[in-house]
Amino acid sequence: MKIEKSFQIWYPEWLQTAKAIVIEHLFTSRFEMIRGRWELGKHIVENFENFERAKIYGEKLTQKIAKDLKTNERMIERCILFYKKYPEEDFDKLSESLPEGKNLSWTKLITKYLPLSKECKHKWDISQHWFCIICGIKRFSDPYKKKYENL
């Protein structure tokens, strides 16, 4: 009986601490992912003149970087956009001004706080259900349909 009562007393407190540990590390991992993507965007932007000078890949530069980093072009473009929107000297200064503090995820950041360009020359990715890989806008139908209907 004493063992059961003792368990009932300490276990809820222990469980609360365990949950706090899990939540803190979840926030930390999300935040570090955001940091890494901001630093990647910064690295690309700061070295862009080297890419321009080389003119090796032209408009396909983000595609080349994405392939070499084993990610997708949209992710690279979002990292660049993120850094351009928040061009602080270092991420720690930026993190204090980020909306929603530690409760911010990459998905929430790109959908809620990175503005979509109204002057975007959309590059539609059909495999992503008509998702523009530049600005992130998503269409639910073929954007070229009207052009074909009038022919």
Image (tube, helix red, strand yellow):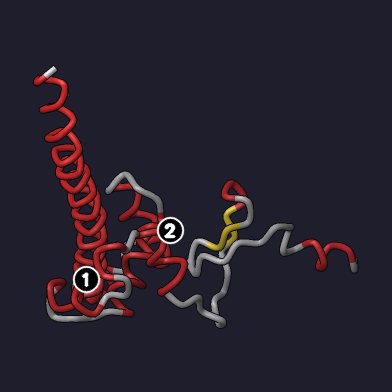
Residue type pointed to by label 1: Lys
Tell me where residue 68 appears, x and y as whole percent. Answer: 28, 47
- Residue 8 on image: x %, y %: 18, 30
Indicate the quadrant containing the N terminus: top left, top right, bottom left or bottom right. top left
Q: Nearer the viewer, residue 42 or 36?
A: 36
Residue 14 screen position, x and y as percent:
14, 38
Query: In which image quadrant can residue 4 be found?
Result: top left
Query: Tag on residue 17?
Result: none
Residue at 48% over, 67% down? 134
Q: Residue at x 26, y 61 (%)?
A: 34
- At x 81%, y 67%, the residue is 147
Distance from disc 2 to disc 1, alpha carbons, whole Å, reads 16 Å
Above or below, 15 against 56 in this view is: above
To which quarter of the image does residue 57 belong?
A: bottom left
**According to the image, label 1 marks what residue?**
42
* Camera-side residue of 112 and 21: 21
Q: In the current view of this chain or complex, which residue is farthest to the front?
A: 1
The numbered disc on residue 74 is: 2
